[in-house]
Amino acid sequence: MKIFVTHNPEDREMYFHWAMEPLAKLGEVVLNPFDRNLTTEELIEAAAGCKVVIVHRATAAPAAVFDSLPDMVALLRPQLDIRTIDVDAASRNGVLIANAPATFVPSTAEMVLAQMLALARNVALSTMIYHEGREPETRLGVQLRDSTAGIIGYGAIGEYLADILLAMGMRVLVSDPYKTVDRPGIEQTDLDSLVKEADFLLPLALATKETENLIDARILSLMKPGAFLVNCSRGDLIDEKALEETYKAGRLGGLAMDVGRATDQRPSPHLAELPGVVATPHLGGLTVHAARPQTMSPVEQIQAILDGKMPPRAVNPDHATRLKAYWKG
């Protein structure tokens, strides 16, 4: 079996290295020939003849990939998010799609907390000034205890984070039209009320058509003067033009982001470079505890294919006609 890995050298070294040796025991591993992420045309050319393609989140798989690779029986993503994979086109071509387990919940929640603290206590700004050989001015910080956190979206990360913030003595507000929150200590409210009361606004909703630009100019105008905005979910949730205008106007106490609309969902440079902004390059789930099981997910799935079994976390198993033909030989 030929297995194509789309990860660029940096991602293979930092994120995917655990899987390389086990994959080599399962088949012939073909690597991304460039030192960068692949275009669709490059992916099609490089993966020709491969039965399985392992596609990093930074490499999309539009319909052309499935229309142009007749030998591919499965496309595996070692992350949870498959929004950049055309599952309908895969199903139409009989290609199996499978993703990875959601092992990133604690790590991402901890990243939110890290960025909250970095803003509240001027950690990042002071560090940068010291690195420049200057003495930072003394600035009053904000204590998390007795402050109000507003969590937008009470999914797995929001729920996990809420427990942490409650334990720290914060008042926790939650807005989620699809969930009824019955956790003692958490106040469920509507979005506008949450935004008006939050000292820390924490968008953690899923990125959907409905939540596109959820944090827009109107919502930003409702924030308390001096409140903090921390986004470790998806850049799609925020109207970046409105956010830039609000931040430059000095209405926010601080801005932190681990995500945005740049490549690989990283923070957009025009926001990340603004003075005082805390920005990290989409590191929320990149801990050993979170990344290793996701990295090993394709190994488990390819082993299942070789054993004649439907891989775990298959997204479209009923449409995997190429895989079923492969098993028949």
Image: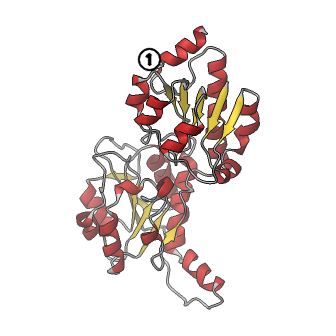
Residue situated in front as seen by the camera: 241 or 122: 241
Residue hosting label 1 = 318
Q: Where is residue 61 in the image (x, y as percent from the top left)?
A: 47, 39
Q: Where is residue 301 in the image (x, y as percent from the top left)?
A: 61, 26
Q: Residue at image x 24%, y 59%?
A: 192
Task: State the count of labels.
Answer: 1
Q: Residue at image x 34%, y 60%?
A: 238
Q: Position of residue 241 (x, y in %)?
A: 31, 68
Please say which color scheme the image uses: secondary structure
Q: Residues within 10 Å of mark 1 (few under 14, many from 20)?
A: few
Extreme residue in the top direction? 328
Q: Residue at image x 58%, y 51%?
A: 107
In what quadrant of the picture does the C terminus appear? top right
- Answer with left or right where residue 57 lies relative to residue 11: left
Describe the element under mark 1 as helix, strand or loop: helix
Quadrant for residue 128, please give it.
Answer: bottom right
In what quadrant of the picture does the N terminus appear? top right
Residue situated in front as seen by the camera: 135 or 87: 87
Is residue 241 positioned above or below 112 on the image?
Answer: below
Q: Disc 1 marks which amino acid?
A: Asp
- Answer with left or right where residue 213 lies relative to residue 269: left
Report if residue 176 is visible in the image: yes
Is residue 81 positioned above or below 127 on the image?
Answer: above
Residue situated in front as seen by the camera: 258 or 87: 87
Report if residue 166 is visible in the image: no
